[in-house]
Image (cartoon, grey):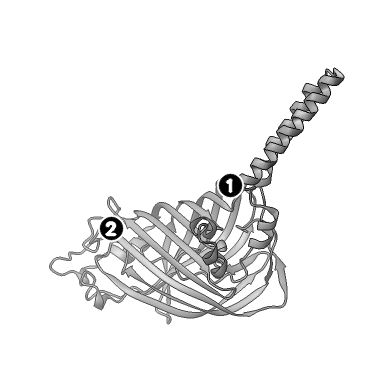
Amino acid sequence: MAQHARDGDGARGAGDPAGRRGGAADAGGRGLGAARRGRIHKRGHALLGRHAAAERAAGGGAGGVRRALLLALLLAAPAAAQEVRLPALELPVLEAGIGGGGGWLPDYPAAEQNHVRGIGTPFVIYRGELLRADDQGLRGRLMRGDRLGLDLSFSGAFPASSRNNRAREGMPDLDWQGEVGPALRLTLWRDKAHPRRVNIELPVRAVFSSDLSSTHYRGVVVSPELAFEDRDAGRRIFGNLPFLREAMGLRAARFRAGVGPIFATERLHDLYYEVEPQYARPGRPAYRARAGYLGTRLQFSIRVPLTPALSFIGGGRVENFAGAANADSPLHRRDWNTTVAVGFAWSLYRSAATVASSADPFD
């Protein structure tokens, strides 16, 4: 949905002030430099030449086999050196701080009006074995594997006042929304040399709305997504500016982009697009919404640790609603929506107890 802050997007994520892993990775070599590889190959060819001369002098017949084995080892060395896993990090089990953010968001999916909305709130990061609350959102880690994972995922959306929306004027306001449900992840590709991967993600969430005095069930939303994640984006984005990268810790910047369709049951479509007879007026006839395709979403987010305790978060989203199940609703006013959001997370407390993170940067 237009307002929904998907796990790890926008300003919802808490900070990861300890997410810096450059020193050990650099010392171990994230890949040999071109000059160093050249020196290795030159020494290798010289060594092969000396072996060949000695074998000719000795008249040995097995020299060809030894030369082939030595050459294979020399050629394999640079490739093997590039397949470096990031070292494990000792991270606090519990962190607490304050975060905030705001953005320019549509009032609801396919709305013709955007408004600036923001929020400031304390946050807690908990790195438990089965439950985690971190920059990827609140999630229960139900199943983990290299290719397949299952999490309990959460999301939400801002409220919108109908007084400030021409299409919904005189209708009930849209309340705060929350979503909860399982999310299946299948990894299609993973870079062996860098913390990058491509996933298919399938979250299925129940939707609830609340005005903080009562809560209502709003159906189910299914939003499969093809997603690209890079947990070391700063090195590639700012690799030619090492002074900036070192000063701001940009080697640990995290980038994510995803695209996919959204489907929802009738209850959620009712919330956005149904017009009950008592709210009908000229230009807004009564309308009964139906379940089905809601739209397609392209979104991205980036999170940059500026200091060990302070992180910047930014994101954006473009959504298309052409051909949606309720495109003929009088409340479906625009086929395209755009969202831009920025935020920060500042960690004020870290527990003395730590947990060793996996060498897997996506854990």
Check disc 1 and give the amino acid type. Asp
Q: Quadrant of residue 174?
A: bottom left
Tell me: residue 318, above or below residue 197: below
Q: Give the residue pinned by disc 1.
A: 191
Q: Earlier in the sequence, mark 2 or mark 1?
A: 1
Q: Which residue is drawn at 83% across and 22% down?
A: 55
Q: Give the residue pinned by disc 2.
A: 336
Q: Residue at x 36, y 63 (%)?
A: 2
Q: Quadrant of residue 17?
A: bottom right
Position of residue 359 in the picture relative to residue 306 (left or right): right
Q: Return the mark for residue 43.
A: none
Q: Which residue is drawn at 56% across and 48% down?
A: 186
Classify mark 1: helix, strand or loop: loop
**Closer to the camera in the image, 232 or 279:** 232
**Closer to the camera in the image, 80 or 313:** 80
* Residue lying farthest to the left in this orientation: 282
Instruction: Give me the C-alpha separation between circle 2 and circle 1.
Output: 34 Å
Query: Which quadrant of the rendered structure holds the N terminus?
Result: bottom left
Q: Is residue 327 visible?
A: yes
Check disc 2 and give the amino acid type. Trp
**Closer to the camera in the image, 175 or 30:** 30
